[in-house]
Image (cartoon, rainbow, N blue to C red):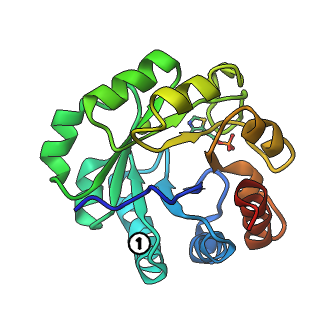
Amino acid sequence: MVPDLSGARLYAILDLGYVPEPKIEEVTRALLEGGADVLQLRAKGHSEERILEFGKRTRPICRDAGVPFIVNDHPSLAVELDADGLHLGQDDGSLEEARKRIGPDRLLGRSTHSPTQAKQALEDGFDYIGFGPLFPTPTKKGRPGIGLENVEGVEQSVGMKIPVFCIGGIKRANLEDVISAGARRVVIVSDLLTASDVSSAVRQARLQITGS
Ligand code: TZP
Ligand code: MG
């Protein structure tokens, strides 16, 4: 059975662009202690061998905490690490191809950058989507922010069927605006990873999103 993300509100990404390698375990624990509902391992520019090593250090922490562990970009690593899911961008191949490689029991997520792509990902059969970047962000350079105008519409059309995680430039400082625009679930990367106290930053964001 594919893990259930219906209760997930805050999706954290362990992006190694922000986390020094010796701190991988510490930051992973802090994200989970603070209350992240999902954790993705994102290690752009590293070899599969290295990412496997990072995954072996983080996967057990997520398993112990009962938090779904998602691998970005690499189907073979998702299988090797026995991840709960795989996240794919628009250029990372089709759902069918990925499903064949990871089997029926892992989540498949897709990054989407417009309402059309969001609806397509739902039709294709993805289990959840990321929708953004809402605002320009150094974490994903070279992509314009798509703004808040379509958040409500995508929530209504797609979010009723599969989880929609708004992403990109979301910070505790603008979270209220994002939620007011209709977002129910968010991904926050740099604002959490660059906080002086990661777990309290997560706790604060969670409180803003869920009220608890
Ligand atoms: N996909 C769209 S925006 C983004 C990704 C991976 C990065 C979001 O990071 P941040 O630091 O929360 O803006
Ligand atoms: Mg990708």
Q: Quadrant of residue 169?
A: top right
Judged from this view, the residue extending furthest toward the top is 116
Q: Is residue 142 above or below residue 174?
A: above
Which residue sits at x=78%, y=44%? 175
Image quadrant occupied by the C terminus: bottom right
For label 1, the crowd category at 10 Å Cα-Cα, with few meaning under 14, some 14 to 19 and many 20 or more, is many
Front position in the image: 14 or 163:
163
Q: Is residue 13 visible?
A: no
Residue 67 versus residue 169 in the image, above or below: below
Please tell me which residue is depicted at 81% across the width and 36% down the height of the picture. 177
Where does the image place residue 152, in percent across and percent down from the top left?
63, 28
In the rendered image, is residue 212 in sight? yes
Instruction: Determine whether, in the image, residue 29 is placed left or right of residue 80.
Output: right
- Give the residue displayed 51% in from the left and 61% down from the top: 39
106 or 97, which lies in front? Answer: 106
| Relative to 153, 40 lies left or right | left
Q: Which image quarter holds the N terminus?
A: bottom left
For ligand 2, the image quadrant comes to top left
Amino acid type for the residue under numbered disc 1: Arg
Q: Is residue 159 left or right of residue 173?
A: left
The image position of residue 22, as x and y in percent, is 61, 73
In the picture of the structure, the residue carrying the numbered disc 1 is: 59
**Outermost residue, left direction?**
100
